[in-house]
Amino acid sequence: MVDTWGNTIIGQRQRKLEARTIREQKEEEEKKLIDLEEAQYQAQQRREAIEKAKTQQYYQTDRVKKFHSALQLTEVLKEREAQIELKRLKDKANIGKDNEYLELERREYEQSIKDDQAKALERIISAQNTRQFQVAQVQEHLKSRDLELREDRKEGEELKKLGIQYHQEKERLENIKKDEKQQLKVDNMKQIRDRDAIRNMQKQQEEDEDEECRIFAAAKRKMMKLRAEKELEIHNEKQKNLDRIRTKLAAQMTQKVSDEDERIHKAVQEAEEKREKEEAEKELKMRKAMKESADHRHVQLKEAEDKKKELRRQELETIRIRQAADEIFRRNEEEKRVRKREDNENLKNFHFDQTNDRKGKEIEKKQKELALDRANLELIAMEEEQFQEYATKVIEHCEKGGRNVYPLRKAAQTGAGGGVGPKFEGKGGIRPSYMVSDKTGRQMPHYQRDSTEETKDNIYGKAPSKKRLGFVW
C-alpha cells in the first residue's frame, strides 16, 4: 500500500528520479535533432564546397581559360567600340565651342598685359627706393672705410716698431749662439788632445808588455832544449840495460835447446805407438760397421718386401671400394636424371600455365584499357556537351548585349586539345596540334583549298583512312 503513496519520502524521491529521467530523454532527443540538423548543414556545406571546387577546377582547364580569354577579348572590343563612339560624340559636341575659347583667351591675354604693366610700375618705384638706400649705404661705407684706413696706418706703425725690436733681439740671440759654438769648438779640441795623449800612453804600455813576452819565450825555449837533452840521456841508459838483458837471455836459450832435442825424440816414439794403436782400433770398428750395415740392409730389404705386399693389398682394397663407389654414383646419377626429367616436365607445365595466365592478364588488361577508353570517350563527350552548353549561353548573352562574338565562336568550336588540326572522331573528337620538325618548332597550318580534297578523292577515293592528319604539303 505505501509503495504507491506520493506523499512519502521514498515516493517523492521516486517522482524526482522519474522526472529527471524524462527530462534527460527530452534533452537527448533535442540534442539528436540538433546533431541531425548540424549534420545536414555540414553535408550541405561540403556539397557546396565540392561544387565550388569543381567549378573552379573546371574554370582552370585550358579550354575554359582560352574561352574566357576570348570573352575578355570580346569585352575589350566592346569597350573599344564604346570609346570610339564617345570620341565621335565629343568631337561633335566641340564643333561650336572654338569661338568662345578664342574670345576667352583674348580677354585673358588683355588682362595679363594690364597686370604686367601694373607690376612693372611697382618694380620701377621699388628700384628708385632701392637706389636711394644704396646711395646712403655707399656713403656710410666710405666713412667706415676712411676710419678703417686710419686705424690700419696706426696699427702698421706699431707693427713696424715691433719688427725692429724683433730683429734686434734676433741678432742678440745669434751672437749668443755663436759664442756658445766657439766655446764648444774649444772644448772639443781639448778633448781630442787628451784622447791622443791617452792613446800614446796605452801604445807605450803595450810595447813594454811585448818586450817582457819576448824574454819569457826565449827562457821557455832554453828550458825545452835542456829537457830534450835529459830525455835523450835517459833513453841511452835504458838501451844499454836492454842490451845486457838480451845477451843473458841468448846464453839461457842455447842451454835450453840441447835439452829440448831429447824431449822431442821421446815424444816422437810415443806418438808413433799411439798412432799404430789407433789404426788397429779403427780397422776393428770398420769391420764391425760393415757387418752391422749388411745386417741392416737385409732387414731393410725384408721390410721393403713386406711393405710392397701391404701396398698391393691396399691397392686391391681401394679398387674394390672405388668400384662400389662408382656403382653408387651411377645409381645416384640415374636418379638425378630421372628427377631432372620430372623437374623439366613440371617446369614446362608451369611455363605453360604461366603463359596462359599472362595471356589472360593481357587480354584482361586490354579489355580494361578498352573500357577505360570508352569511359574517357564518354567523359570527353560529356565535358564537350557541358562546355558547348556553357559557351552557347555566354555567346547568346553577349549577342544580346551587342558584343562581337566572333572570338567566342572561334574559341568554342568543337574538339578539345587546343590545336588547329582536324578532329579525331575515334579519339573523342580531340583536336591535336602538329609541330614542324625544324628548330623553330612552330605549329603547322591547317588551311587548304577545296581543290586539294577533290584531287585526293580522284587519286585515293573516299576511303576513311586517307584523311589528312593536319599536315599541309
Image: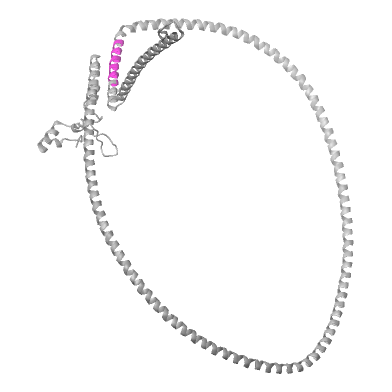
Residue 309 sits in quarter: bottom left
Q: Is residue 453 left or right of residue 397?
A: left
Q: Is residue 284 magenta?
A: no
Q: Which SS type dominates the magenta stretch?
A: helix
Query: From the viewer's perspective, is residue 366 above or below residue 77?
Result: below
- Residue lying at 36% horizontally and 14% vertically, measured from the top left: 29
Q: Nearer the viewer, residue 39 or 325?
A: 325
Instruction: Inspect this view and state whether residue 404 appears.
Output: no
Q: Nearer the viewer, residue 261 or 146?
A: 261
Q: Position of residue 295 (x, y in %)?
A: 49, 86
Give how far across and how far down residue 375 sits, in percent.
22, 31
x 59%, y 7%: residue: 129
Which quarter of the figure has residue 213?
Answer: bottom right
In the image, taking residue 153 as reference, residue 59 lies left or right, namely: left
**Position in image of residue 288 (x %, y %):** 54, 88
Q: Is residue 81 magenta?
A: yes
Task: Decide which of 224, 91 is in the foreground and name it.
Answer: 224
Task: Confirm whether residue 54 shows in the render.
Answer: yes
Residue 88 lies, with reference to residue 345, above or below; the image says: above
Which range of residues does the magenta coloring cover? 72-90
- 412 vs 29, left or right, is left
Furthest residue toward front: 1
Is the residue 281 above or below the residue 316 in the image?
Answer: below
Q: Quadrant of the C terminus?
A: top left
Residue depicted at 33% across the width and 69% down the height: 322
Above or below 443: residue 74: above
Residue 292 position within the rendered picture, expressed as x and y whole percent measured from the top left: 52, 86
